[in-house]
Image (cartoon, grey):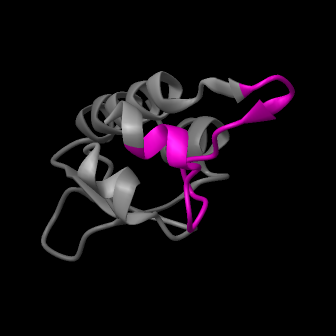
C-alpha cells in the first residue's frame, strides 16, 4: 500500500499525511454532524503503517455505508449533513 493508493481510494473525504513521530494520520475534509459522531464516525484516524490506516479508513467507510439509507423515495441520507432528517434520529 502506498500513500498514492490510499489517496486514490479515500482522498476525496480524507487528507492523508505522515505523522512527525512516525506513522500516518487522516483528517476528514468535511464536517460531521453530531449524529454522525454519535454513530461512531471520527474526524481523525491514525495508523502506525499505511496498511493499518487503510483498515481504519475502511471501517469508517463501512459505518458510512450502513448509514446511507433511502429514507424517502429519491432522497439519500447524507452523513456529513449538518441536520440529518428526523427519521434518522428516530432510527438511532
- The image shows residue 81, relative to residue 88, as above or below, that is below
Residue 57, percent from left and from top: 38, 38
The secondary structure that most of the magenta stretch takes on is loop
- Say which residue appears at 46% left-offset and 64% top-offset: 32
The foreground one among 40 and 55 is 40
- Say which residue appears at 52% left-offset and 38% top-offset: 87
Residue 68, percent from left and from top: 58, 29
The quadrant where residue 19 appears: bottom left
The foreground one among 76 and 9 is 76
For the magenta stretch, what is the residue range? 72-89
- The residue at the far bottom in this view is 20
The quadrant where residue 80 appears: bottom right
- The residue at the far right in this view is 74
Residue 26, percent from left and from top: 38, 59
- The image shows residue 27, relative to residue 91, as above or below, that is below
- Say which residue appears at 48% left-offset and 40% top-offset: 88
The quadrant where residue 50 appears: top left
The foreground one among 15 and 49 is 15
Q: Quadrant of the N terminus?
A: top left
**Magenta-drawn stretch contains 76:** yes
- Say which residue appears at 20% left-offset and 56% top-offset: 23
Q: Quadrant of the C terminus?
A: top left
Left or right, residue 33 beside residue 54:
right
Amino acid at each position: 500500500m502506498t500513500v498514492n493508493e490510499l489517496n486514490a481510494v479515500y482522498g476525496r473525504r480524507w487528507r492523508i499525511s505522515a505523522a512527525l513521530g512516525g506513522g500516518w494520520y487522516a483528517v476528514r475534509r468535511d464536517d460531521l454532524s453530531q449524529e454522525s459522531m454519535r454513530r461512531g464516525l471520527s474526524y481523525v484516524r491514525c495508523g502506525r503503517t499505511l496498511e493499518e490506516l487503510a483498515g481504519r479508513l475502511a471501517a469508517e467507510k463501512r459505518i458510512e455505508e450502513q448509514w446511507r439509507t433511502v429514507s424517502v423515495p429519491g432522497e439519500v441520507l447524507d452523513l456529513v449533513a449538518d441536520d440529518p432528517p428526523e427519521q434518522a434520529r428516530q432510527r438511532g
